[in-house]
Amino acid sequence: MEMTPNLSFRNFLLVAVLHLYFSSISYAAIIEEVIDVPVSVKTLYGQEVNQTIKVTVFRDDQREKAPYLVLNHGRPANADGFAKMKRQRYSENSQYFVSLGFVVFVPTRVGYGDSGGPDVEYSGRCEGKDFAPGYAAAVDQTVAVLKMAENFSYVDVSRGIVVGQSFGGMTAIAIAARGISGLVGAVNFAGGGGGNPQDRPENPCGGNRLGSLYKNYGATSKVPTLWLYSENDRYWGPDLPKKWFNGFVEAGGKARFVELPPYMDNGHGIFSGAPSSWKSAFEDYVHDIGF
């Protein structure tokens, strides 16, 4: 007869302790902020442009300090696409990268969307493309973002990676070739330039020039890189990316090439459209380089 009150009291104590325990747990939330970063870049014709750009920052509010991941966007195939870009976020993928332990910076570079300004990444007419200055401008903007990141206590600027889609993918490889302090890796999603799937499907302007530039990057790149291209990418086709990759590696670059499956009628958008197709390869890569 005396056991029931004792058991009830013990159950009460157990419930009370569990309530205190779970109420003390603070769950992580992802914070999205927008910062202005001053940049200074040069155009194809040597003109200097000084302005600020909008940079979207995603971070975990429970992580005191985390390595960085800079995510660079692509370039529209047609001129009317620039203003439509607005502020670049890649929200779903950015939050995924935060879940892996990174602070994510997504610059909207000069000439695009909410940042506005002249098209500093213009590379000339189709028959005479000069890509190097455009990628140099994108690299300079990434360096400016990392310089600003030094002011934030939650960023470990001594260690991080760069990731990019399309024009941003080749920008990631250009950054790897720059030898930035603290950079330990670069990921190229569908990287290249001069492509137009409507007017020149699988035949970008200056494809061979891009190959030469990739080879130049390979000669100075010191960090491991990951290249991911869908087999039905209508900007470059299935063969050019492998040719670019081979030239990069032959010149001394460290790289792994992963051919992703087809995505809809143009695999160029697989980064945002089908993350499940590349997450495993990405996670293997970041694990291999020490994250």
Image: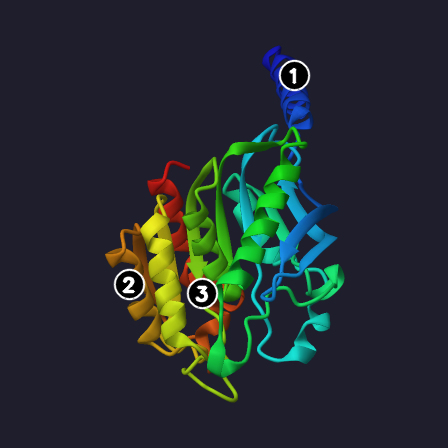
How dense is the environment of label 3, judged by Cα within 10 Å: few (below 14), some, or many (20 and up)?
many
How dense is the environment of label 2, judged by Cα within 10 Å: few (below 14), some, or many (20 and up)?
many
Q: Where the C terminus falls, by quadrant?
A: top left
Determine the residue positioned at 55% across, 75% down: 124
- What kind of residue is marked 1? Leu
**Count of residue discs:** 3
Viewer can see residue 284: no
Q: Where the N terminus falls, by quadrant?
A: top right
- What kind of residue is marked 3? Gly
Q: Is residue 103 left or right of residue 194?
A: right
What is the number of the mark on residue 247?
2
Residue 229 is drawn in which quadrant?
bottom left
| Residue at the front extreme, as displayed | 46
Residue 206: x %, y % from top left: 43, 77
Residue 24: x %, y % from top left: 67, 24
How dense is the environment of label 1, judged by Cα within 10 Å: few (below 14), some, or many (20 and up)?
few
> What residue is shown with label 1?
13
